[in-house]
Image: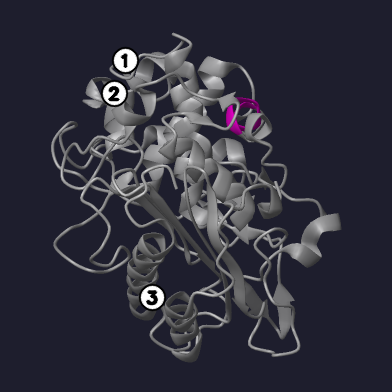
Amino acid sequence: MLLSSLILTVQIATAPQVDAAVQGGIDGGSFPGAVVVIGTVRGVLYAKGIGHFTWDADSPVPDPDSTLFDLASLTKVVATTPSIMRLVEQGHLDLDSPVVQHLPGFADEGKDAVTVRHLLEHRSGLRAFLPLNTETETAKEAKARVLSEPLRWDPGGRVAYSDLNAMLLGWIVEAVGGEPLNVLAAAAVFDRLGMTSTQYRPPRSVRTRVMPVGLWRGYVIAGELHDQNAVRLGGVSGHAGLYSTGADLAVYARMWLGDGTVGPTTVFRPGMVDHFTRRGWGNRALGWEMRDTTGTDNTGTSMSPATFGHTGYTGTSIWIDPIQDLFVILLTNRVFAPRGGSITVLKRVRGDVADAAAALRREVCGANPSC
């Protein structure tokens, strides 16, 4: 998907507030480079790459159309959540069905009460993380380890964000859909929206386009997943492993703003988007996180309380505001040799970019609801 096919009639060549916010993150040592894409349901208002692939000023400038980012936990809402939605819409999956119905190995004491909905809401009772890369040797062993993990809290109670929930959701997609998650996610969403760059396990032929995520003995690491649990699981998992570009994520965000439809393509029937993005327990929806209105980290002060989104450990984020008809995508490689204040700086940058994006939309569109 090329951004040239998504740009609105009114184009903004520059957005100084956005540029300054991102440059502040670079100057603060949080990340060497970033891509920002801002738009509405009709198209893109602003798209730009700022900084460089690495701290070397001679390295490439990231490009919204072509640069691939390791999305980390954005995988949860770009691949896993819509795959679950597709199965629900087709009548193949009930959100209130017990997880053990789909994954018989998930059968220890008390776990028969955990439902698919609990996994999406992060209310399963499972802890946040397991070091599968050190505790297991194969993908099969890693899956068995997660399935056998005992609950730490009663299901349906407290919200505790957990990678294990998303891993289980990915395996449920595979069990119900009958094919690997990467195949099902592509069929459900990516292929239909023309998201041709969005993929698990990108081939070596595209590695020059991949934003680096680290250094090893002086060598730049690009195209190797940062999340070692996803690596242990073979590179395809419900919690991490997906790569994408700013352009592909822009059309994806437009689909969510369009109640499941973008342009001539309908991905989900009316009402599905609303169901999955309605605020539930705390700041959680189904798969998505809702804007935390008590602070300015990540979403600033200008986005509405209905804003939903997600962040990724590698420095990625997507926030979608259905009230203001606005999406904000910020992709960075903050795990690449950060020079100080990494996550603290990044959270502030995300908030500043969100506020600048809201101001940009007002400047371009005014009160025009169809902008």
Q: Residues within 10 Å of mark 2 (few under 14, many from 20)?
A: many
Q: Amino acid at mark 2?
A: Thr
First along the sequence among labels 1 and 2: 1
Q: Nearer the viewer, residue 209 or 114?
A: 209
Q: Are marks 1 and 2 in contact (CB under 8 Å)?
A: yes
Taking the spot 37% from the left edge, 24% from the top edge, the residue there is 272
Residue 243 horizontal/vertical position (percent): 63, 52
* Residue 222 in view (yes/no): yes
Taking the spot 66% from the left edge, 45% from the top edge, the residue there is 198
Q: Nearer the viewer, residue 320 or 225?
A: 320
User: Any mark on residue 115, and which?
Assistant: 2
First along the sequence among labels 3 and 2: 2
Q: Amino acid at mark 1?
A: Ser
* Residue 144 in view (yes/no): no
Reading the image, the residue beneath label 3 is 349
Q: In the visual, does 343 lie left or right of 231?
A: left
370, above or below 181, in the image = below
285, above or below 244, in the image = above
Q: Amino acid at mark 3?
A: Val
User: Any mark on residue 294, and which?
Assistant: none
Which stretch appears magenta?
Answer: 184-189
User: Any mark on residue 97, and which?
Assistant: 1
